[in-house]
Amino acid sequence: MAQVTLDVNGRPYVVGCEDGQEQHLVDLARLFDRQVRQVSQEMGQLGETRLFLMGALLLADELSDMKMRMSALQAELARHQSDRARIETRAATALESAAKRIEKLADEVE
């Protein structure tokens, strides 16, 4: 197991993680650090626990919003796929009908 030192709000935190996940964890810590620093600027100095809680809640709110948007986009995609399938079925039926008419006309001409 690897260990990585993360800097959040100017303080180092040593955290264990799976080998190979160090950079991902550093990136996540940077995201959290930006959120915590933003909360600190907007709300003034809070205790570290409260500051971290507010930062985590804001990130959780963003995550929740993105999940709702993703769900709406998935529903829209499903509707488009269903519409496409209906259109393809109608097109195939029209092509079959046209082919039958062409065959009938060809038989009449011969």
Image (cartoon, rainbow, N blue to C red):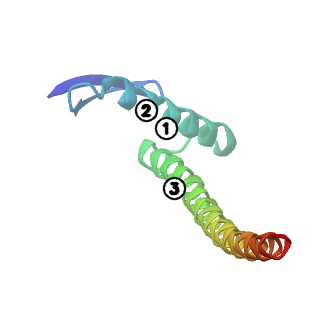
x, y percentage for residue 8?
44, 30
Answer with the quarter of the image where residue 23 lies: top left
The foreground one among 27 and 13 is 27
Q: Which mark, residue 60?
A: 3
Image quarter of the C terminus: bottom right
x, y percentage for residue 81?
63, 66
Q: Taking 69 as reference, is 98 above or below it?
A: below
Secondary structure type for disc 2: helix
| Pointer 3 with pointer 1, Cβ within 8 A | no
Q: Which mark, residue 32?
A: 1
The residue indicated by pointer 2 is 29
Answer with the quarter of the image where residue 41 lies: top right
| Pointer 1 with pointer 2, Cβ within 8 A | yes
x, y percentage for residue 105?
83, 74
Crowding near pointer 1: few (<14 within 10 Å), some, many (20+)?
many
The residue positioned 54% from the left and 39% from the top of the image is 36
| Pointer 2 with pointer 3, Cβ within 8 A | no
x, y percentage for residue 37?
58, 34
Q: Taking 52 as reference, is 72 above or below it?
A: below
The answer for how far apart the CA atoms under marks 2 and 3 are is: 14 Å
Q: Amino acid at mark 3?
A: Ala
Crowding near pointer 3: few (<14 within 10 Å), some, many (20+)?
few
Earlier residue among tags 2 and 3: 2
The foreground one among 17 and 58 is 17
Q: Which mark, residue 18?
A: none
- Left of 53 or right of it: where is 71? right
